Amino acid sequence: MKLAILNGTIIDGTGAPPRSGSMVVTNDRITAILTKNDPLPEADQTIDAQGGTILPGLIDAHDHQTYHNTFGVLQWQWTLPRDQLIIRSCIAALDALRHGVTSIREMGATGATNFSIKKAILQGDLVGPRIFTCGMPLTITGGYAYWICTEADGAEGVRAAARQQLKQGADFIKVMASNEKPMPGREEQSLAQFTREELRAAVEEAHAAGVRVAAHACGSEAIERCLDAGVDTIEHGVYLNRELAQRMKEQGTYYSPTLGIYEFDTDLFWRRGKTKAEFCKILMKAHREHFEKIHDIGLRWTVGTDAIVPIATEMQKLVEAGLDPMTVIVSATRTNAEMIGRLEDLGTLEVGKLADILIVDGNPLKNMGHMANVKVILQGGTIYYPDQLLPMLPSMQPPSPGET
């Protein structure tokens, strides 16, 4: 089947200037990109972009399907029965797709339910973004978010835990390199976890298997240990300073700042609890202050939401914090595809690539908020409309206290 997308402004994800034109999709691949002066292509079906913007499908570099847009204290959510976690993940997949997210780097789930969701989507049993996942992250015994992690201690223990996740099909390894909690009197409300030797063991195992290592790392000591160990991506990076950011640039480390999650977690609407809300106000303030001091360094930016932040909102926050709009779009498409190792198929609008395509009303280069105006989503040539997916989703209202 041949599909033509007409009358739009193309932002192809490479960083090239936008241009007016049309596109041709044959089955699941992009087969032509035409200028506005080329004759209109013949096709079995057409989509009129109506002057909107045509972009690559978005890739969320940091999401958790089992608590994507969910309510309640996280420790409670992480201990829900497996069947409830699977149901939540199915809902999350639909919600992400309707926001234009065609691929997700899934960053950890209790009992590795993310492997089940990945398989269901690959087999066509479930509609949703392609899943690239770590399975269960690695943490020290009793460490950060141990409910959703595999606990491991010592270099050999970490090595064995990494091998186990790879055995199950992990696309990358994730390590919890820090633990954030209130510590009065300390400038950085974060403690480093894992020694350099333990982190190196995870990196060695991952790289030997041809995959990358992502690190939840906040606080200068944790970030420094990760860079010494050769970790590939830093997640969150609260308290990231210029010296460490410069090292990240030199080492080619990817950075997913997830700016929005700390602000969202200050909102009691999400029922995370007053203690977490107050603590996240501290982290949010620190993160903004440090980000404003390093945003000009030119890192390998990626865009990740961390579960409850719409991806358009995260992109808007990155622009507000100082990044150029085109940089943010490239980060959410091309750079994210490169980071997950799928740039040959995803991340840009180029002939031969999979037809993951997003059409939005407006011009996100002038107003990044227009990324929320999703009109049409193509994933591998299959067409979805946001209104088509919305009825499948539950009402976004917090439950009454008695229901949690």
Image (tube, rainbow, N blue to C red):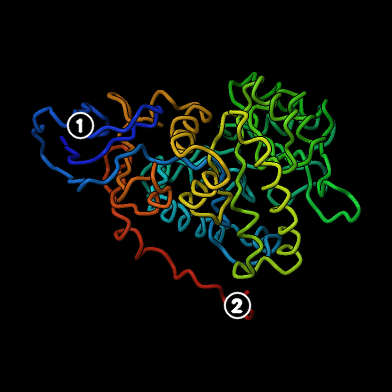
Check the image and name the residue furthest to the right.
185
Q: x, y percentage for residue 256?
A: 60, 38
Q: Residues within 10 Å of mark 1 (few under 14, many from 20)?
A: some
- State the residue in front, 14 or 194: 14
Residue 144 is labelled as none
Q: CA distance from mark 1 to mark 2?
A: 48 Å
Which quadrant holds the C terminus? bottom right
Looking at the image, residue 204 lies above or below residue 73? above
Is residue 356 depicted above or below 344 in this figure? Answer: below
Question: Residue at the location (19% across, 39% down)?
Answer: 5
The amino acid at mark 2 is: Glu
Q: Locate the N terminus and report the quarter of the image it occupies.
A: top left
- As shown in the figure, which amino acid type bears the numbered disc 1? Thr
Q: Left or right? Give the position of 337 relative to 30.
A: right
Secondary structure found at label 1? strand
The residue identified by callout 1 is 26
Name the spot of residue 283 as percent of width and height, x first: 73, 52
Disc 2: which residue? 403
- Residue 2 visible in image: yes
Image spot of residue 251 (x, y percent): 66, 20
* As drawn, 236 above or below 40: below
In the picture shown, does residue 266 fall above or below 101?
below
Q: Position of residue 70 (x, y in %)?
A: 56, 63
